[in-house]
Image: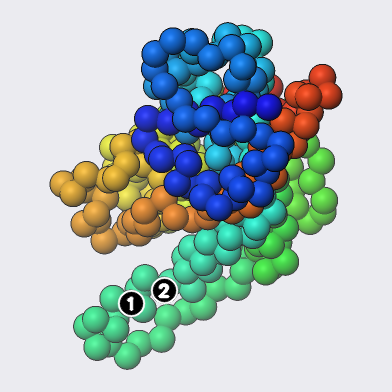
Amino acid sequence: MRCALVSRTLDLRGYLGAEIGRFADRIEIVDHRSDGKDADVRLAVAWHPPDDAFERYPNLQAVCSIGAGVDNIIACPSLRPGIEVVRVVDPAQAQMMSGFVAWHVIGHQRRFATYLGQQRDRIWQRLSQRHAQDVPVAILGYGEIGQRVAADLSQLGFPVLVWSRTAKPAPPPIRGFHGPSGLAAMLDETEVLVNLLPLTQETEGILNRELFNRMRRGGYLVQVGRGEHLVDEDLLAALESGQLDGAALDVFATEPLAPAHPFWRHPKIVVTPHDASDVRIEAVAATLVAAADAIGAGQRPPYAIDRNRGY
């Protein structure tokens, strides 16, 4: 089966590297070209494809992302309705994300930022301690990664609340919420908010002034979803007013983050370069092979998304 590599921002052949050789006997990899048609291509690997990318492939049946996010593919104007979009599910990515989130949640609970400031000023002063059970953590998004993060934080003793668009079962003591009314009810109890949502029309700009004002005063934001979820000026206003005590930001609407952006210099913001977690190349390759096998058997590829929902 022929598979095209399609990206305007990344050398996908270099990204996949030696993994290509492991499935070369089953999948023929071809580089994308903008001229002409390629009727033999039935599968593609894509990341931020050009707007007209998929016009070249009249018999394309599925497009695989190289990550859990697929919004950059769904937004491509030439993606026809009948083409499946496949995301990567990697348990190791969920583990890495969980550790990253726990770092920031515990940092807020134990006031590590204050201690770092005291170290710079050579101040020896112990701070009052708070137990994990006194710091409610809410998670927006309860998919594979959200479930791992919730379970690990619960094991650490934090009260964990999770929200999804529709109802999903959550094992006690984790508490589940769904829908607009559920979001409002959850936020009333939230001190630390972790965003793991996919980017859709409904979730764009969800991290805004109204949402921050529903949280407990002095709360904290861990933003590891998509940059477009956050209204930058609303976060800055919430930090200035004290409604939020701090924020950890790993994703941004424009990346790299511009050198002049106020997030870099803000004393209550921790910036990391979209590095909270990553998908292993092996997981991408396994997803690609599974998609090719499914297409060859006339079946829907594993981890194909619901394009109406966007995830």
* Residue that carries the numbered disc 1 in the rendered image: 116
Q: Secondary structure at mark 2?
A: helix
Question: Measured along the vertical axis of the image, is residue 62 above or below residue 57?
Answer: below
Question: Measured along the vertical axis of the image, is residue 288 above or below residue 272?
Answer: above
Question: Measured along the vertical axis of the image, is residue 107 above or below residue 262?
Answer: below
Instruction: Tell me residue 182's x, y (percent).
Output: 66, 33
Image quadrant assignment for residue 86: top right
- Judge from the rendering whether residue 206 lies leftward or rightward of residue 146; answer left or right: left
Seen from this angle, which residue lies furthest front? Answer: 25
Q: Quadrant of the N terminus?
A: top right
Judging depth in this view, the residue of 193 and 134 nearest the camera is 193
- Judge from the rendering whether residue 18 lies leftward or rightward of residue 273; answer left or right: right
Q: Secondary structure at mark 1?
A: helix
The answer to the question of whether label 1 and label 2 lie on touching residues, with beta carbons closer than 8 A, is yes
Instruction: Tell me residue 260's x, y (percent).
Output: 16, 46
Q: Which mark is residue 112?
A: 2
